[in-house]
Image (cartoon, rainbow, N blue to C red):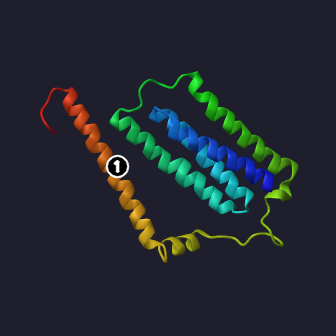
Amino acid sequence: MSALLAIAAFVAVASTTAVVLQRRAVHALLYLIVSFFALAVAMLALGAAFAAALEVVVYAGAILVLFVFVVMMIGAEGPIPGPRAWIGPVCLSIVLLGELAYAFLVEPGLLAPAGSGTPPAVRPKEVGMALFGPYAICVEIAAFLLLSGLVGAYRIGRRDAGSRAGGGKP
């Protein structure tokens, strides 16, 4: 398990570093997708399958769709990424895919959580009770931050569109 966790951590650090170093937003989003998947693999290696599934669905799915929408809305995407832009994310994704294949096919017991037997089932009701119980204020703050980021991106995009059209202040 420690080797799988180390490889997933390396891929997560490498892809997150690439996110910060990219000059184009679309290229940074490609590496961010790989980073989120690497974190999901790390969670899976630690025995938190439900958290890994939530990482993929919520972050790699919903949040990145929002990021892509904002990038397209403010017009920061530039030209379509060429084949060279895909080399880094594809190589890191192949490492993650090989790691998952090894974990599931060669040593299926490797991903079982420490302890005896099967892990306790986590129902959606329990997740909802935890999120909107002691962590309710954190969920509301995150929702407020995402909404304010979306409004800010809309305002920036609207201002740029107005200045290009030759119109006055929006």
Quadrant containing the C terminus in the rendered view:
top left
Residue in the image at 63% along x and 42% along y: 14
Residue closest to the far left: 168
Q: Which residue is mark 1?
A: 150
Is 35 positioned to the left or the right of 160 in the image? right
Residue at figure coordinates x 71%, y 36% from the top left: 94
Give left or right: position of 116 versus 94. right
Going by the numbered disc 1, the residue's amino acid type is Leu
Residue 32, x across and y down, in percent: 55, 43
Q: Which of the 4 quarters of the picture holds residue 167?
A: top left
| Camera-nearest residue between 73 and 95 | 95
Q: Position of residue 48 (x, y in %)?
A: 69, 63
Q: What residue sits 62% from the left and 35% below the top?
A: 89
Q: Residues within 10 Å of mark 1 (few under 14, many from 20)?
A: some
Can you say whether 112 is above or below 115 in the image? Answer: above
- Furthest toward the right, the residue is 106
Q: Quadrant of the N terminus?
A: bottom right
In the picture as drawn, the residue positioned furthest to the bottom comes out as 134
Total labels: the figure holds 1
Query: At numbered mark 1, what does the secondary structure look like: helix, strand or loop?
Result: helix
Horizontal side, residue 131 vs residue 15: left or right: left
Quadrant of the rendered structure where residue 49 is? Answer: bottom right
Residue that appears at 36% across and 60% down: 144
Picture coordinates of residue 66 (x, y %)? 43, 46
Residue sitting nearer the eye, 121 or 110: 110
Q: In the rendered view, would you say 132 is above or below 169?
A: below
Residue 131: where, in percent of width, then height? 50, 70
